[in-house]
Image (cartoon, rainbow, N blue to C red):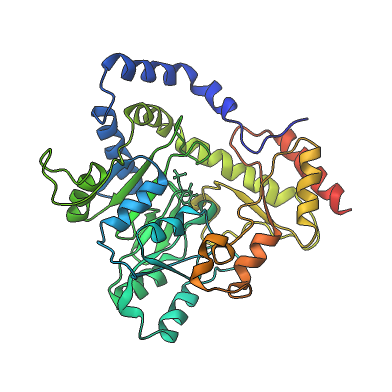
C-alpha cells in the first residue's frame, strides 16, 4: 500500500472536466490579466469568509506583504507574531524593514498564546508605541484564540492581520458569534498554494477586509499603486491574481465544504483509532467542525525523526511542519534571540509530524498508517 501525504490527482479525478472547461474558457477569452473571473472569486471568497471585501493577489506571501504595506510601516516598527509558522509570516515583516517580535505558542493548539502577548505588553511598556500589527496564524486549519487577541489589540489600538493561509473556512466562536477565519481582524490573508484546502493549479492568494478604505488601498497596492492608470500616489507592485487560477478556484470552491468534511471525518478516524502511549493528537479547541485540518499533527514522545524515516520506507507520506522555529533560523540571527527563548515552539519543532489527511484518503489507507505508527512504537 502507498499513502501519499497529499494526492492532488485523486482530487483532480473528481473535477477534471470542469477544470479543463474553465481553463479553456480563460484561454479562449484572451483576457489574461484580472477580468471577470478574478472579480467573481473575490466576491465569492469574501462572502464565504463573512468579510465585506476580497482582493485577489499573487500568493499568500504577497497577501501578507501588501496587508503590511497597507499599514504604511516605517523601518524599525515592531510586528508581534508567532515563532512557529511557515516562513512567510515573519519573512514579509523583515522585507519591509520592520522587526518581527515573537511570542510563544500554546502547546496544545500550536497557535500564538494570547497570554504571552499580554505578558509581552506588560514587560515592554516602552515599546508598545512601536508595535504596528499583531499577526496571529490560524495554524493547521484551526483559529487562534481571537477574542483575547482582539481585546489586547483594541486596548493598544493595534491592527490585527490574520494569517489564514491554512484556514479558509475555519470558524471561531467569538463573543460576537460564530466567525470565519479572515473576518475578525483588520485584514485576513489567504493562500491558494496547491496544498492548502482550497488550492489552485499554481500560486494565488487573497486579502479580505471589512474596511472600505483598506480595501481601496489594497486594490491600488496590488497594481503598482496605480489609480487612475499611470498615476501613482502609492508605491505598490505587481501582486495580481491570475484569471486562470481564479477560474479553477471558482470550480473548487463549490466542493470546499465537502472536502473540509472529508478531512474532519479522517481526523476523527485517527483520533479514535490511533493508540500510542504519550502521543498527543490535535487538540480540538472549539469543535471538530470548526477545524478544517489543513494538517493533522501528532506530537510524539520520542524518536520523531526515526518515525518519519520508518514511515517513508513504508510508502507513507509524512512531513515535519516546521523543523526550525523562526528565532532559530539563520536569517533571523540578527534579531538576537537564543535557543530556549520559546520552549513550546522548540518542543513542537522537535516532536511533531503531519500525517496524510486529504479527503480522498480511504479507511484502509488510514488503518495502514495507524498500524505502522503503532508498530514503530511497539
Ligand atoms: C502557505 C502559507 C503562507 C504563504 O502562502 P504562499 O501562497 O505559499 O505564498 C503563509 N503563511 C502560512 C501560515 C502558510 O501556510
Rendered location of residue 90, percent (x, y)? 45, 59
Rendered location of residue 98, percent (x, y)? 36, 65
Question: With respect to residue 21, does 350 lie above or below?
Answer: below
**Residue 342 in which image quadrant:** bottom right
Relative depth, front residue between 16 and 224: 224
Left or right of 69? Residue 6 is: right
Residue at screen point 52% across, 55% down:
139
Relative depth, front residue between 299 and 68: 68
Question: With respect to residue 152, does 177 lie above or below?
Answer: above
For the image shown, how many numbered marks are present on the structure? 0
Question: With respect to residue 79, does 223 lie above or below?
Answer: above
Rendered location of residue 37, percent (x, y)? 28, 28
Rendered location of residue 227, percent (x, y)? 13, 43
Quarter of the picture containing the N terminus is top right
Left or right of 278? Residue 288 is: left
Left or right of 7? Residue 289 is: left
Residue at screen point 57% across, 61% down:
329
Residue at screen point 55% across, 28% down:
11
Residue at screen point 23% across, 28% down:
35
Q: Residue furthest top?
A: 28
**Residue 280 in which image quadrant:** bottom right
**Residue 315 in which image quadrant:** top right
Relative depth, front residue between 334 and 257: 334
Amino acid at each position: 500500500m502507498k499513502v501519499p501525504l497529499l494526492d492532488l490527482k485523486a482530487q483532480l479525478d473528481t473535477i477534471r472536466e470542469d477544470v479543463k472547461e474553465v481553463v479553456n474558457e480563460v484561454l479562449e477569452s484572451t483576457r489574461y490579466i484580472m477580468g471577470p473571473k478574478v472579480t467573481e472569486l473575490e466576491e465569492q471568497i469574501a462572502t464565504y469568509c463573512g468579510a465585506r471585501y476580497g482582493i485577489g493577489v499573487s500568493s499568500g506571501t504577497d497577501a501578507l506583504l501588501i496587508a503590511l504595506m497597507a499599514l504604511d510601516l516605517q523601518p524599525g516598527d515592531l510586528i508581534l507574531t508567532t515563532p512557529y509558522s511557515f516562513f512567510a509570516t515573519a519573512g514579509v515583516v523583515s522585507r519591509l524593514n520592520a522587526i518581527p517580535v515573537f511570542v510563544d505558542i500554546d502547546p496544545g493548539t500550536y497557535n500564538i498564546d494570547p497570554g504571552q502577548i499580554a505578558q509581552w505588553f506588560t514587560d515592554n511598556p516602552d515599546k508598545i508605541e512601536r508595535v504596528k500589527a499583531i499577526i496571529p496564524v490560524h495554524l493547521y486549519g484551526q483559529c487562534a484564540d481571537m477574542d483575547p487577541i482582539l481585546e489586547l489589540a483594541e486596548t493598544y489600538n493595534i491592527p490585527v492581520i490574520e494569517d489564514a493561509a491554512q484556514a479558509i473556512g475555519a470558524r471561531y466562536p467569538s463573543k460576537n458569534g460564530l466567525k470565519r477565519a479572515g473576518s475578525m481582524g483588520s485584514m485576513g490573508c489567504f493562500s491558494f498554494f496547491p496544498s492548502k484546502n482550497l488550492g489552485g493549479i499554481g500560486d494565488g492568494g487573497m486579502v479580505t477586509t471589512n474596511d472600505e478604505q483598506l480595501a481601496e488601498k489594497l486594490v491600488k497596492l496590488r497594481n503598482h499603486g496605480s489609480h487612475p492608470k499611470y498615476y501613482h500616489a502609492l508605491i505598490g507592485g505587481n501582486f495580481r491574481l491570475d484569471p486562470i487560477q481564479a477560474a479553477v478556484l471558482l470550480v473548487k470552491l463549490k466542493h470546499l465544504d465537502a472536502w473540509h468534511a472529508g478531512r474532519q471525518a479522517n481526523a476523527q478516524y485517527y483520533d479514535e483509532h490511533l493508540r500510542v502511549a504519550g502521543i498527543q493528537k490535535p487538540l480540538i479547541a472549539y469543535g471538530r467542525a470548526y477545524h478544517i485540518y489543513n494538517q493533522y499533527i501528532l506530537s510524539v514522545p520520542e524518536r520523531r525523526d526515526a518515525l518519519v524515516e520508518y514511515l517513508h520506507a513504508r510508502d507513507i507520506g509524512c512531513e515535519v511542519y516546521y523543523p526550525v522555529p523562526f528565532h532559530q533560523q539563520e536569517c533571523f540571527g540578527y534579531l538576537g534571540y537564543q535557543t530556549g527563548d520559546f520552549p513550546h515552539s522548540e518542543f513542537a519543532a522537535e516532536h511533531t509530524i503531519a500525517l496524510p489527511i486529504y479527503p480522498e484518503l480511504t479507511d484502509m489507507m488510514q488503518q495502514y498508517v495507524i498500524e505502522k505508527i503503532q508498530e514503530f512504537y511497539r
